[in-house]
Image (cartoon, coloured by chain):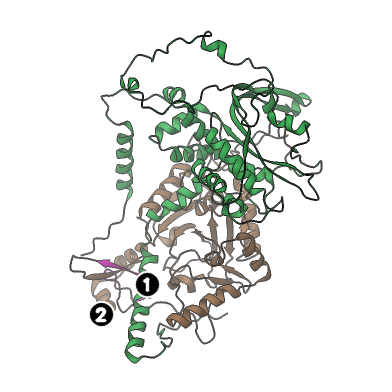
Chain colours: A brown, B green
Amino acid sequence: MKSPCQWNETVTLPSKNDAVFRNGDYNFAYLDEQTKRMIRRALLKAVAIPGYQVPFAAREMPLPYGWGTGGIQLTAALIGPRDVLKVIDQGADDTTNAVNIRSFFERMTDVATTTLVQEATLIQTRHRIPETPLRADQILIYQVPLPDPVSRLEPRGTERANMHAFGDYGLINVKLYEDIAQHGSVAMAFDYPVIVNGRYLASPSPIPKFDNPKLHMNPALQLFGAGRERRIYAIPPFTSVRSLDFDDHPFTIQPWDESCALCGAPDSFLEEMTVDDRGNRQHICSDSDYCAQRRATQPAHVRHQEAMP
Amino acid sequence: MYVAVKGGEKAIEASRRLLEKQRRGDSRLAELSVSQIREQLRLAVARVMTEGSLYDEELAALAIKQAAGDLVEAIFLLRAYRTTLPRFGYSAPLDVGAMAVQRRISAIFKDVPGGQFLGATHDFTQRLLDFSLLADGGDTVLPAIAGGDDDAISLSPARLARVYDLLEQRGLIAQEEAPADAPDPVDLALEPLHLPAERPTRLQNLARGDEGFLLAMAYATQRGYGGNHPFTGELRFGTVSVEVSVDELDGAVIDIGDLAVTECQTINQFHSSPDHPLAFTQGYGLAFGHSERKAIAMALVDRALCSEELGETITSPAQDPEFMLLHSDNVEASGFVQHLKLPHYVDFQVEVELLRRFQANAHRADATDEIPLPVERDRDLAIQE
C-alpha cells in the first residue's frame, strides 16, 4: 500500500526486457509494464472465475472510451513481439475503427498484422465472432461497451453486484418472459445474455445472437474488456456457454433465405446491402476474411450452385 | 454491384490531413503559439489542467492548440498523455492556508481577518463587448487609477487565515478529519472506483469531473433538487507550495514547486446527529488554476453527496453518489456518447430482422384476431449444456 506524503521506495520506470522500444516516446504496446502486470493479474482472476466481471483500473488510452479501450488494453497487456494481430469491426478488417486500432498497434509494437484468421494469434473484435473456427492457440479479445446484461434493467452497479453474488437472475428471466408474452419470442437480437460455466450471467458483447453458439466450448481463450466500465471477464477454452432461454422456448438463431452474393456461403452472417435507389438488396458476408478466402479457393460455378440451391 | 462503403487507411489518412489543415486555418495569418495560449487563454488552460488531471500549463496549452480549442478534446489529449507518466510518489497535503493569495472573498462576513481581496475577476465587468480588442497589435493601455500601480495592489504572500478556521474556533462548524486508522486515500488514476466511495475518493472524482456537468447539478441543488442552502464561506485563488518528503534523504521535506489553485469552501445548513454535534455543514471544491465556477460547483455537489452520511433523505440525482460519480467524467462520457458514430451495421441489421418478424406476427394476429403464438421458426440450435 502506498503511503501519502512519501516517495515510493522503488521508482518504477518502463521495463525494457522483451519489450523493445520501437517508438522512442512510448513503451512497447503503449502501456507501461506496471499497468500490464495489473491487467494480467485481473485476467488471471477472470480466467479462474469464468464469466465473473473483475474490476480493473482502466487507464486513459489515446483512443476514446467507448471505441474499444477495454479490448485495446487487453491486447496491449498480452501482445508480444512474436504475436500476429488481427483486428475486426462488424466482421471486417477494413472498417475505419478496425483500421485505426490496427495501425495504433503497428505504431506501438511493430508486430505483424494479418487479415487471415488462421494466421492470427490475437484477434481483437467488435460486434462479431469470425466464421472460421478458432484454435486453442488463439485468443479472441472482445470490445465490450456494457459488460452487465442486467444494466438495462437495473442501472445501479451496487444492486447488480448483489444479484451476481447470489446468482439472482430473476429480473432478466422476467424480461425474457415478458418479451415472449408480448411478441411471441425474445426481443433481443444482439448482445444476447449468456450463462458462463453454469454460474455467471455475462454479456457476449454486442455480437448478433447468430454468433452466440460459437461462444460455447470454443477451443480459443475468449477475453472481454470493458474500459469505461472498468471490468474484465473471460470465457476459458472449452467452457460451457448457455444463451438464456426456457425449455418451451429454446434459444434459436436468425436464418436467412439468401446466400452470400459474392462467395455463395449459405451459413455465414449476412449483411443486407441496398444496391440501388429502387431499394433492391443484396446479401454479403459480414466476415470479409471468410468471404475472401472462400472466393479465392472455390471456382465460380461451385459458388453459384451453393448460392442457388 | 456491391458498393459497400467501408473506410480504409487512405480515408483515415486523408481525414487526418484535412483536420490538420483546418486546425491551422488561413495560413496568411500568423500561427498561434503555445506560449500565447498559455498566457492569453489562461482560464482555458486551467480547465484543461483541472479536468485533464495534470498540472502542466505548457502541455495543456499545446493540447488546446492541437484540439483547435475543443477543450474536452484537449482534456482527453492530456489524460491520454498522463497515462504514460510513471508515478513517483505522493506529496504532502497542500497547505492552502499558506497560499500566496491573489484573490480572496468571503460572502459571510463583511470583514475577515486579512481582508477581502477582489483580485482579477469577471464578476463586475458589465459584460460589454470591448471593441478595442478587435484592433490587432498594440496592447490595451489601462488608465491610471488613484492609489498607485497594480503591483502595490497585489497582495504580499503573508499567511491569510481561512475563514473556515475562524468558524471552527467558534464551534460553528467541524472540519472533517480522517480518523487515525483511516486507510490511505484511493488513487483513482490507478484504482477503479468502488462504491460506496469515501469522501476523499468522491472529491478526487469531482475534481476531474466535467465543469458543465457539475455546474448543472450544483444549480439543480439550489433550485430544490437536493436541497442545498450554501453560503460561500470563502473563495480564494493563488499559489501554494507542493512539498514531498524524500525517503532517500531521511524523510526530508522538499518544496518542489508551486501550483496555482482555486479553493472554495461553502457553509451549509446546520445539522445534528449522534455522531455530529449541532453545527453547520460544509462543501469543498478545489481546482487547478483560476477556476471559480468549477470550484463552487464542486463544493455544492460535494455537500449534496454527503447527504447519506448526514442522514438526509436522498431525493435527487445530485445526492446520489453512484449517479454522480459514474457520470461526471467528460472523457468517458464524450467517448461513449460519440461512439454512436461507429458502425453498428450488424446490430442494426438484426434489429431490423427482429422488427420485421414481430410486425409479421402482429399482422397475422390482427387477421385472425387471436393472441399471437410463438412463431419462432428459426433453425433449432438449442445448445447442449
Q: Which amino acid is tagged 1?
A: Ser
Quarter of the view holding residue B230: top right
Q: CA distance from mark 2 to mark 1?
A: 15 Å
Q: Nearer the viewer, residue B198 or A215?
A: B198
Look at 69% across and 29% down and name the residue there: B163
B3 and B365: which one is in front? Answer: B365
Q: Which residues are magenta?
A: A258-274
Estimate the x, y position of residue A255 in percent, counting from the top left.
37, 78
Q: Let me know if marks 2 and 1 both belong to one chain.
A: yes
Q: In which image quadrant can residue B356 be found?
A: bottom left
Instruction: Say which element carries label 2.
Output: loop
Residue A268's disc is: 1
- Quarter of the figure that contains the C terminus of chain A: bottom left
Q: Residue at x 61, y 60 (%)?
A: A157
Classify mark 1: helix, strand or loop: loop
Give the chain of mark 1.
A
Is A59 positioned to the left or the right of A283 in the image? right
| Residue plotted at (66% across, 45% down) | B201
Choose between A273 and B106: the one closer to the eye.
Answer: B106
Give the labeled residue for mark 2: A308
Query: What's the chain of the residue with tag 2?
Result: A
User: Residue B53 shows which numbered tag?
Assistant: none
Question: Secondary structure of the magenta portion, mostly?
Answer: loop
Asked whether the residues under the numbered discs 2 and 1 touch, taking CB atoms below 8 Å apart as contact, a structural biologist would say no
